[in-house]
């Protein structure tokens, strides 16, 4: 890696393939360090990251998705910029999405989402996952080799969330074709290029769910969409249809993309590490902790931004009001103060679940149970239907010189493609 201070984390391709040396350099200086290119305070320490996540009074989430790009629309001056944030929030990209909202709006909108992701609904959705996985694997495994990200992970996660949200089966092909766009190649949010981000890249989801919800309010049915359409805020008031559509769209877009990255990382480990693959084949009860360790060592989200409302101190570093802060979850999850030998993948790591890949505080990912279930079902069925899973050397090179391409974004961490080869069980090899 070239000179540390010359690296621009948000623009430099050098940190796309392997950002971890950069994270370690940052942490070695201080767990809270101001990078020189965009004036962002980078938080790499675990305890410091948790402090920021839990302090929603001090840190606004209005810039959580885009950080310093395109920048706040007016100068942030004074010792309390809360009023400026509220005055200009709507001018920021993705300002209508749940991750960028602050209380009390966030509290109300998250409550709508939690009406959807109930334990009962998740249990029903998981039951459907097994059939969805097998249906896709029938085709994906047929040739004994395939590209996993686009051949299974993307379609599977899309179908799972479509089922969770109650998208009619006859509409799911349209969802798949409309949403199979730049996200899987790294375009859009967090891209390393200098193009501006559109204010709202979710028009298809908004318009589609608005139509569903308006129809269900006129003609209720015994289905998931009707439950979503008739959900109320905690005070009993009825939200605008667009508010509900935004909640559904956020679950669809954010949940699907990050789970694809989790599945890619998990299968890469299984295919690279035959010892771990064999262990999970014989001891299936180890799969949940394997998933947690995957989330720790390769967090699907590199980081999350916050904007300080007032002066504060984190990790002994003074943070003025109006500062952009990036909590690097991928770095915090490798903090040696929290995780012993943090760069080593240990499927039996006793504290693996202490990772913060799903965030902490009021913005903890509400879809975490869904992502865990999708990963477990995927791994279980692949192990059931194969006797060996390998990396394609033709596509990624031999074991001592592998080559992988990662998404060129400063937000997502994951493989763009993963080519695998399989030895199928007797039933699947027929």
Image: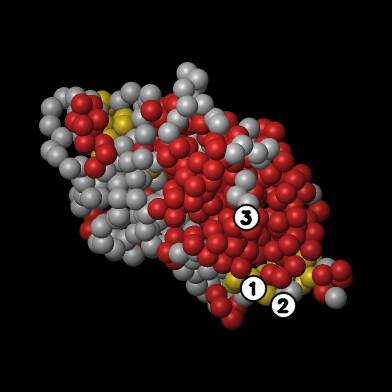
Examine the rendered structure and indicate whether residue 230 appears above or below residue 270: above
Q: Is residue 126 left or right of residue 196?
A: right
Colour setup of the view: secondary structure
Task: Specify the quadrant that holds the N terminus.
Answer: bottom left
Labels 1 and 2 touching (C-beta < 8 A):
yes
Residue located at (55% from left, 31% from top): 230
- Report x, y in % for residue 136: 69, 64
Query: Disc 1 designates what residue?
Result: 146
Secondary-structure class at tag 1: strand
Q: Is residue 364 visible?
A: yes
Residue located at (49% from left, 34% from top): 364
Task: Specify the quadrant that holds the C terminus.
Answer: bottom right
- Report x, y in % for residue 56: 36, 27
Q: CA distance from mark 1 to mark 2?
A: 7 Å
Nearer to us of marks 1 and 3 is 3
Q: Which mark is residue 159?
A: 3
| Residue neighbourhood size for the residue with mark 2, other residues' Cα within 10 Å, grouped as few (<14), some (14–19), many (≥20) | few
Residue located at (54% from left, 58% from top): 175
- Report x, y in % for residue 234: 49, 21
Q: Is residue 224 left or right of residue 239?
A: right
Secondary-structure class at tag 3: helix
Query: Disc 2 designates what residue?
Result: 143
């Amino acid at each position: 890696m070239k000179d540390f201070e010359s690296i621009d984390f948000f623009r430099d391709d050098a940190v796309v393939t392997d950002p971890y040396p950069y994270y370690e350099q940052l942490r070695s200086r201080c767990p809270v360090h101001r990078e020189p290119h965009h004036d962002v305070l980078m938080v790499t320490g675990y305890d410091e990251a948790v402090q920021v996540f839990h302090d929603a009074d001090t840190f606004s989430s209005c810039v959580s998705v885009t950080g310093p790009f395109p920048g706040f629309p007016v100068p942030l001056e004074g010792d309390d910029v809360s009023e400026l944030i509220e005055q200009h929030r709507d001018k920021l990209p993705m300002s209508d999405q749940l991750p960028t909202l602050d209380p009390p709006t966030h509290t109300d909108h998250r409550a709508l989402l939690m009406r959807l992701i109930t334990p009962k609904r998740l249990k029903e959705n998981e039951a459907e996952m097994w059939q969805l996985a097998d249906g896709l694997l029938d085709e994906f495994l047929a040739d004994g080799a395939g590209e996993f990200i686009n051949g299974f992970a993307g379609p599977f996660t899309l179908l799972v969330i479509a089922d969770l949200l109650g998208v009619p089966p006859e509409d799911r092909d349209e969802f798949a074709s409309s949403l199979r766009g730049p996200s899987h190649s790294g375009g859009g949010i967090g891209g390393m290029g200098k193009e501006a981000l559109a204010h709202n890249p979710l028009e298809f989801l908004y318009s589609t769910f608005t139509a569903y919800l308006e129809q269900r309010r006129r003609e209720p049915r015994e289905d998931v969409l009707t439950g979503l359409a008739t959900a109320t805020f905690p005070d009993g008031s009825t939200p605008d249809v667009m508010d509900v559509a935004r909640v559904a769209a956020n679950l669809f877009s954010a949940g699907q993309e990050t789970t694809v990255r989790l599945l890619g990382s998990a299968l890469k480990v299984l295919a690279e590490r035959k010892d771990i693959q064999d262990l999970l084949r014989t001891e299936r009860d180890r799969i949940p902790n394997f998933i947690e360790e995957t989330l720790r060592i390769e967090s699907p989200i590199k980081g999350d931004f916050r904007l300080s409302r007032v002066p504060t101190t984190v990790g002994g570093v003074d943070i003025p009001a109006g500062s952009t802060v990036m909590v690097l979850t991928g770095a915090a999850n490798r903090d040696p103060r929290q995780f012993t030998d943090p760069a080593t993948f240990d499927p039996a790591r006793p504290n693996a679940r202490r990772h913060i890949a799903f965030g902490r505080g009021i913005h903890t990912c509400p879809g975490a149970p869904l992502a865990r279930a999708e990963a477990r079902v995927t791994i279980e069925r692949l192990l059931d239907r194969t006797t060996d899973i390998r990396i394609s050397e033709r596509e990624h090179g031999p074991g001592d010189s592998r080559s992988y391409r990662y998404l060129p974004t400063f937000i997502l961490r994951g493989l763009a493609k993963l080519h695998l080869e399989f030895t199928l069980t007797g039933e699947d090899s027929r």
